[in-house]
Image (tube, rainbow, N blue to C red):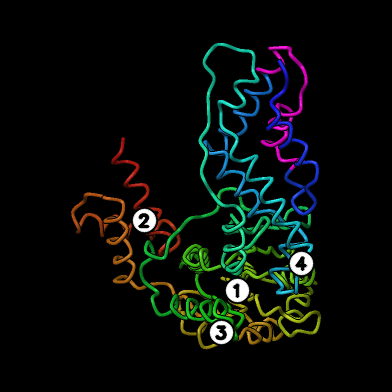
């Protein structure tokens, strides 16, 4: 039995890829190509190639066309980078891309029965779905809105961390939504407004969110990123140990069409800390110019970074000796937003809202008493304490 001529032509054409050549090493396409390329008539080898391909595809999608198109959209290559920068693209490169999209579309539209004919096995084998996507039209339509979609690792992921000095996606990001948050509406709106300015290409400020622990500073930032992911917003979390990499990180994302929040969580410094000077230099712009697509958001519970009037107003904690250099750092954030510990009424409001969200059925008086007792045991009233209590009550109700 001779090999299928159509499959042979597709396999040969794949070798001509230049712009999207990286896709040939994809772990789903590799076994698919092995099935197209083989000349063996050994039924066992054919069967293993087919099932290996299906196993890898099913782990990601049941639709081959949509999966391959997603790979194309997420591919980081010299063409998409030039298009995102707005560079003038030569006609021969445009023609190359159009031809490669047509080749990949043929691969993505291979039907199960076309491969099953090549497998000498008469049992039942799993199949996949196909779609009639026009790769050329859809890809260029996406390019026209590249500022919302992005490319490479940033296309499908909202949040990133630094690992081994590289920006990598968070595998299981916090999906908290703005609708799940209560209280601190004015504080949250100030961050939302600044983020909207960034997304609309207007001047946006660096933001310091400071105040008591557990008041939702970090949660606010993550919820805003989730809310505006589809508008092209991404978050890169920076630890204190990562601060020396800030100039390099900003260089890497400088020309990216997306917008980025560089988020420094739990910001604090000890006397003589080298990372303090690095962040101050970045905020001042003396190390590297902050890209127009980037803002720095920092959350801190350190009382050294609080304005003196805020610290003195909180009689629940002693006012530390002000460290002038840290106060100077706080002043370099264009927007500074305080998250004060809630009073009893506001704290119980958090508890009641969360109880409704988690469907905790409990008399109000009993719930309030439990909330106050929990706060006393856990360091005081805060949205975090309210959530911890309600999660415990919800879990107990499920037993």
The answer for how far apart the CA atoms under marks 2 and 4 are is 68 Å
SS at mark 3 in the image? strand
Which residue is identified by label 3?
335
The crowding category of the residue bearing disc 3, from other C-alpha atoms within 10 Å (few below 14, some 14 to 19, many at least 20), is some
The crowding category of the residue bearing disc 2, from other C-alpha atoms within 10 Å (few below 14, some 14 to 19, many at least 20), is some
User: Which label sits in the foreground, 2 or 1?
Assistant: 1
The answer for how far apart the CA atoms under marks 3 and 4 are is 46 Å
> Per the image, is 331 magenta?
no
User: Which label sits in the foreground, 1 or 4?
Assistant: 4
Residue 292's spot in the image, x, y percent? 67, 80
Sequence-first tag of 3 and 2: 3
The crowding category of the residue bearing disc 4, from other C-alpha atoms within 10 Å (few below 14, some 14 to 19, many at least 20), is few
SS at mark 1 in the image? strand
In the image, residue 119 sits, relative to residue 165, either above or below, namely above
Q: Is residue 20 left or right of residue 140?
A: right
Sequence-first tag of 2 and 1: 1
Which residue is identified by label 4?
91
Sequence-first tag of 3 and 4: 4
Residue 266 in view here? no
Image disc number at residue 374: 2
Q: Identify the residue shown where x is 78% and y is 66%.
A: 245
Quadrant, the N terminus: top right
The reply to whether dot 1 and dot 3 touch (C-beta < 8 Å) is no
User: Which label sits in the foreground, 3 or 4?
Assistant: 4
The reply to whether dot 3 and dot 2 touch (C-beta < 8 Å) is no
Query: From which residue to which does the magenta span run?
Result: 24-47
> Per the image, is 42 magenta?
yes
Which residue is identified by label 1?
297
Q: Is residue 219 left or right of residue 259?
A: left
Q: Identify the residue shown where x is 60% and y is 12%.
A: 121
The residue closer to the viewer here, 68 or 312, is 68
Q: Identify the residue shown where x is 78% and y is 72%.
A: 247
């Amino acid at each position: 039995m001779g090999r299928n001529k159509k499959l042979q032509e597709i396999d040969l054409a794949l070798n001509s890829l230049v712009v999207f050549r990286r896709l040939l090493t994809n772990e789903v396409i590799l076994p698919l190509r092995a099935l197209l390329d083989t000349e063996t008539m050994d039924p066992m080898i054919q069967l293993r190639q087919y099932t290996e391909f299906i196993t890898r595809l099913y782990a990601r999608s049941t639709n081959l066309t949509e999966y391959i198109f997603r790979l194309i959209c997420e591919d980081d290559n010299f063409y998409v980078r030039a298009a995102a920068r707005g560079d003038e693209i030569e006609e021969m490169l445009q023609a190359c891309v159009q031809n490669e999209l047509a080749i990949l579309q043929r691969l993505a539209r291979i039907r199960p029965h076309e491969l099953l004919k090549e497998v000498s096995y008469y049992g039942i084998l799993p199949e996949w779905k196909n779609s009639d996507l026009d790769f050329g039209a859809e890809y260029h339509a996406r390019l026209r809105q590249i500022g919302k979609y992005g490319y490479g690792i940033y296309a499908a992921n909202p949040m990133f961390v630094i690992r081994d000095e590289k920006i990598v996606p968070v595998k299981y990001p916090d999906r908290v939504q703005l609708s799940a948050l209560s209280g601190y509406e004015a504080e949250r709106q100030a961050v939302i407004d600044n983020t909207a300015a960034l997304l609309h290409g207007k001047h946006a400020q660096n933001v310091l969110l400071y105040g008591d622990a557990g008041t939702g500073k970090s949660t606010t930032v993550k919820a805003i990123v989730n809310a505006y992911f589809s508008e092209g917003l991404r978050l890169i979390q920076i630890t204190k140990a990562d601060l020396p990499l800030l100039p390099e990180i900003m260089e890497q994302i400088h020309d990216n069409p997306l917008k980025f929040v560089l988020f420094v969580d739990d910001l604090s410094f000890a006397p003589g800390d080298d990372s303090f000077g690095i962040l101050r230099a970045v905020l001042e712009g003396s190390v590297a110019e902050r890209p127009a697509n980037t803002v720095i958001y920092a959350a801190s519970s350190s009382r050294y970074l609080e304005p003196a009037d805020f610290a003195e107003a909180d009689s629940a904690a002693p006012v530390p000796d002000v460290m002038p250099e840290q106060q100077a750092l706080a002043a370099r954030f264009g927007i500074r937003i305080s998250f004060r510990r809630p009073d009893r009424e506001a704290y119980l409001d958090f508890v009641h809202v969360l109880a409704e969200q988690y469907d905790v059925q409990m008399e109000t008086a009993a719930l309030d008493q439990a909330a106050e007792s929990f706060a006393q045991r856990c360091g005081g009233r805060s949205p975090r304490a309210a959530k911890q209590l309600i999660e415990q009550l919800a879990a107990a109700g499920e037993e």
